[in-house]
Amino acid sequence: MSSKYNKVVVLTGAGISAESGLSTFRDNNGLWDNHRVEDVATPEAFDRDPELVQRFYNMRRAALKTVEPNLAHQVLVQAEKEFDAFILVTQNVDDLHARAGSQNLLPMHGELLKQRCVQCHQITAIMGDITLDAVCVQCERVGTLRPHIVWFGEMPLYMDAIMAALMACDLFVSVGTSGTVYPAAGFVEIANQVGAHTVELNLEPGDQNSQFKQSIHGPASEVLPAFFNQLNHGTAQ
Ligand code: APR
């Protein structure tokens, strides 16, 4: 590897999966399949209408069967082999990074293909629907399973590992995220504070654009391969 960087953190958002056919959030008037975020992605919504929330996530889980990883996901699999340290943090709950083959992956907003028992906290794989009368395999209670998704107002996952990687990184790359949702939106500031090079790769300038030392705008499947290719040939900043 001829790049001058060797401790890399990449943050991805919905934009990296857009070319696979999964719609982003904010490009859709802030609606998810015509639902307001407050109606489907908060603990209060789940308490109020568990059937609606389960149906919403069951549909999103089923939609994963219709999509495949794209070139941008694949480039990140190759990139993780080329640096001494490489952590991929994703805000996405789809499984496209995992399916592409990324290993050092931290899905900070949870995973559609997992469910969690609200009573015993056991996390298990789920490929199909979570039903309201589903039984937890661990504690055998009925109706206690929820999507293993971080809803608004809940604590993102893997924050200790993410903070440690950010504090040590010399390159931070943000791909396909609008930079509107914290704490992920604040990662660029932390990377800047430790002196890392910070790069935004996005279709358009995101909310945190002014914080990045470099930005390249375009579809992820074009700008991501070009960026890592340029690093390999030692011509990047
Ligand atoms: N290539 C690169 N970027 C793209 C592409 C593409 N092909 N298509 C769209 N984008 C960009 C959009 O311009 C937008 O800035 O991806 C960004 C997607 O932003 P959001 O829809 O806000 O998604 P994200 O930033 O991942 O949202 C963060 O918010 O709703 C919550 O928990 C949810 O994880 C999600 C979080």
Image (tube, rainbow, N blue to C red):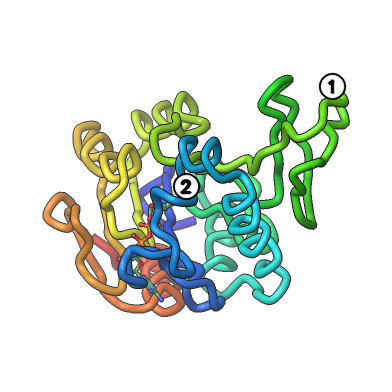
Q: Point out residue 155 in the picture as x, y percentages from the top left corner.
A: 44, 29
* Image point (25%, 34%), residue name: 190
Please state which amino acid type lies under the numbered disc 2.
Answer: Ala
Dot label at residue 166 = none
Label 1 and label 2: CA atoms lie apart by 25 Å
* Image point (37%, 48%), residue name: 5
* Image point (46%, 77%), residue name: 221
- Which badge, 1 or 2, is on the more N-terminal residue? 2
Task: State left or right for residue 64 relative to residue 190.
Answer: right
Task: State left or right for residue 112 relative to residue 125.
Answer: left
* Quadrant position of residue 3: bottom left
Q: Secondary structure at mark 1?
A: loop
Q: Point out residue 216 in the picture as x, y percentages from the top left corner.
A: 25, 70
Dot label at residue 41 = 2
Q: In which quadrant of this rendering is ligand 1 seen? A: bottom left
Q: Is mark 2 within 8 Å of ligand 1?
A: yes
Could you say which is closer to the camera, residue 116 or residue 195?
116
Q: Secondary structure at mark 2?
A: loop
Q: How many marks?
A: 2
Dot label at residue 139 = 1
Please state which amino acid type lies under the numbered disc 1.
Answer: Cys
